[in-house]
Amino acid sequence: MSGKVWLVGAGPGDPKLITLMGMECLHQADAVVYDRLVNPLLLAQAPADCVLIDVGKRADHHPIPQEQINSILIEQARLGRNVVRLKGGDPFVFGRGGEEAEALVRAGITCEVVPGITSAIGGLARAGIPVTHRDFASSFHVITGHLREGKDPHNWQLLAQLDGTLVILMGMSRLAEICQTLIAHGRRADTPAAVVMNASHPEQRMVLAPLGELSEQATLAGLSAPSLIVIGEVTSLALLQSL
């Protein structure tokens, strides 16, 4: 008899930001298949005899292809195990959780999704940046900066003209290009912007700068992935954290 797979969002980084349901799943897991950005403290919540399987990726290094990760989930479930697929943020926000759920359903494996706090909202909140505010932004837009090689499906002209907050995940390797492209398509170079590194972790760091200077300032500060890029008037409110 096959086991079950929970696709669990671990939240933006602070282990306390996982949901109660996510923690309950960890406590009864026979196997945990986890990503690179998952806080190691969460793995300690699994039973002592739980099988821990690291399938972490970096932007430039994918030692375990997604198809193999799908197969690992299926194989572990077919061993009769309760499997937690532990993913940073929310499993369905640029986490390829949708692909994993599809593979599990096709294989006849029982699957349940446990939402998590996406870094696009929770990570920024921990930096004192609200994605919406009545005086500054009535909408927000989350896009990925990590694109398939040779493909850029984004309508940068449209993105540059949007009035709301623009949040870019997995975009640090293209930060200069992203800033230049948005400005070239009409976004003001003096638009407030920020980069938040290691959001919600004790070592969280942030740079605030106009869009036209953001890449240079982030480089000078030594910021790197994992980082959030946020563009819009709401970034001026990050100063509230120091009051």
Image (spheres, rainbow, N blue to C red):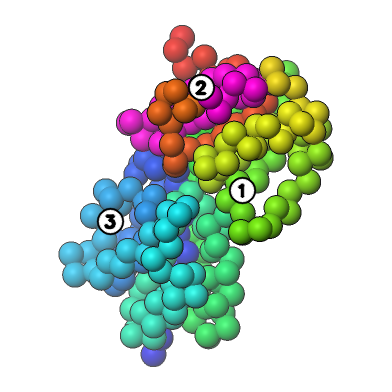
Q: Quadrant of the N terminus?
A: bottom left
- Is residue 158 visible in the rendered image? The answer is yes
Which residue is the site of mark 3? Answer: 43
Is residue 156 found left or right of 82 in the rendered image?
right
Q: Position of residue 223 (x, y in %)?
A: 43, 31
Is 202 one of the magenta-colored residues?
yes
Q: Marks 3 and 1: which is nearer the front?
A: 1
Q: In the picture shown, does residue 157 fall above or below 88?
A: above
Is 54 one of the magenta-colored residues?
no
Mark 3 secondary-structure assignment: helix
Instruction: Classify residue 234 by image quadrant.
Output: top right
Instruction: Classify residue 226 by image quadrant.
Output: top left
Q: Residues within 10 Å of mark 3 (few under 14, many from 20)?
A: some
Residue stretch in magenta? 191-217
Mark 3 or 1 closer to N-term?
3
The amino acid at mark 2 is: Gln
Which residue is the site of mark 2? Answer: 217
The amino acid at mark 3 is: Leu
Mark 2 secondary-structure assignment: helix
Q: Residues within 10 Å of mark 2 (few under 14, many from 20)?
A: some
Mark 1 or 2 closer to N-term?
1
Q: Which mark is residue 144?
A: 1
Mark 1 secondary-structure assignment: strand
Q: CA distance from mark 3 to mark 1?
A: 27 Å
The amino acid at mark 1 is: Thr
